[in-house]
Every structure is written in C-alpha cells, then in structure tokens.
Amino acid sequence: MVAPGLATAASLAAVRAAIRPGVTTLELDSLAESAIRSLGGVPNFMKEPGYRHTICSSVNDEVVHGVPGGRVLDAGDIVSIDSGAEIGGWNGDAAITVVIPDPTRPAIVDERETLSRVTEQSLWRGIAALATAKHLNEVGAAIEEYIESQGRYGILEDYVGHGIGRSMHEEPPVFNYRVRDRGPQVKP
C-alpha cells in the first residue's frame, strides 16, 4: 500500500501547490490525475460508479464529496480536497484542507484556519488513542472528547472513516464520535 499512498500524497501536494484565487476545482482535478498517473496509478475515485473525477473538492460550506467543476476559488475560501490512487490492486485515500489567504478579511481567514487546526488535531488525537486502545470505538471517543473541549465545534455523524486495502472502502467503519458498539479489538 506504500505506492498508492505515495501517489495519493503526490496528487494532494500538486493540488496544494496550485490552490489560489482564480483556479477552478476542475483544474485542480486535472493536476491530481496527472500526478497519480505519472506514478503508474489510476485515480480510484473514477472507479466509483457514476463518478468521473480524481478528487472531491469541497469549498466553504460544502461538507464533503463536492464534485470538481467550473467553480473559481476566491481569497478566503476553505477548500477540502480528497484524492485516492490504485496501484497494483492496492488503494490509497487521503484528504487535505487549505485556507486561501485573504488580507482583506483576516477574521474569516483566522476562523477557517482555526477550524482546520482543530479538525487536524482531532485526527491526531484519534491516532494517538490507537496506541492504548483495546477497541476501535476508543478512537471516536478521543476525537469527540477533543472536539467538545474546543467549545464551539461539533461533529457531523453522517460521515465516518473506513478501512482501506484492496478496495477503497473496506471494513471496519471508523467513527469520529462515541458509539456504544466497542467495535473490533485493536491489535498491535
């Protein structure tokens, strides 16, 4: 899974470098596809029935799975990009969030950068929980505890993480909030 992970990372690095005012999400999609294919990969999102893009691009109030198109990015936008690659029958899948600088609206930029930092830190709290977790539900509990400690943020329970391997979406579901079901046992 190293090769598809590296191809996914390369696609996200290419997109991150290109995000700026005036760029369309479809242009970002093309850059991601080129990066993946240059490393011998296939954009695995394109293997999803009915989806013909390399990335999902969610801007501002779009939560997740936005479709790339003619939308032009503006200063101050918060942009989340999800990308994935398949190489040798294995899959990679990852996402980044970028806030486009806007010196004319520092309060909006600061608010969006704070949201991005809190979200990223919650990811790291979940990963850290794996070091001592006995069951997978402890990951979601750690994430929710951190988010609640930040005061003004919440968690959308409609979306969860997932396993990955030969398929892009595999068991088990990885919740980012507390659930009663303990989930699978975590093994070192």
Image (spheres, helix red, strand yellow):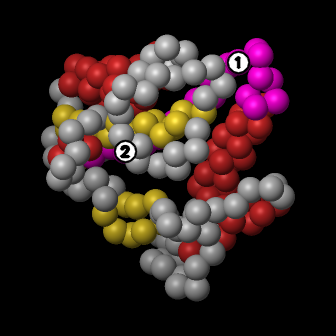
Badge 2 crowding class, 10 Å Cα cut-off, few under 14, some 14 to 19, many 20 or more, is many
The secondary element bearing badge 2 is classed as strand
Q: Position of residue 5 (x, y in %)?
A: 35, 38
Looking at the image, is 2 positioned above or below residue 144? above
Say which residue appears at 57% left-offset and 21% top-offset.
74
Q: Quadrant of the N terminus?
A: top left
Say which residue appears at 61% left-offset and 29% top-offset.
77
Say which residue appears at 70% left-offset and 18% top-offset.
102
Alpha carbons under labels 1 and 2: distance apart: 29 Å
Is residue 106 toward the left or the right of residue 99 in the image?
Answer: right
Looking at the image, is 41 positioned above or below residue 38? below
The image quarter in which residue 133 lies? bottom right
Residue 102, disc = 1
Amino acid on which the number 2 mark rests in the picture: Asp
Is residue 119 toward the left or the right of residue 87 in the image?
Answer: right
Is residue 140 toward the left or the right of residue 34 in the image?
Answer: right
Looking at the image, is 77 positioned above or below residue 128? above
The secondary element bearing badge 1 is classed as loop
Boundaries of the magenta span = 91-109
Asked whether residue 176 is in view, the answer is yes
Does the magenta portion include 104?
yes
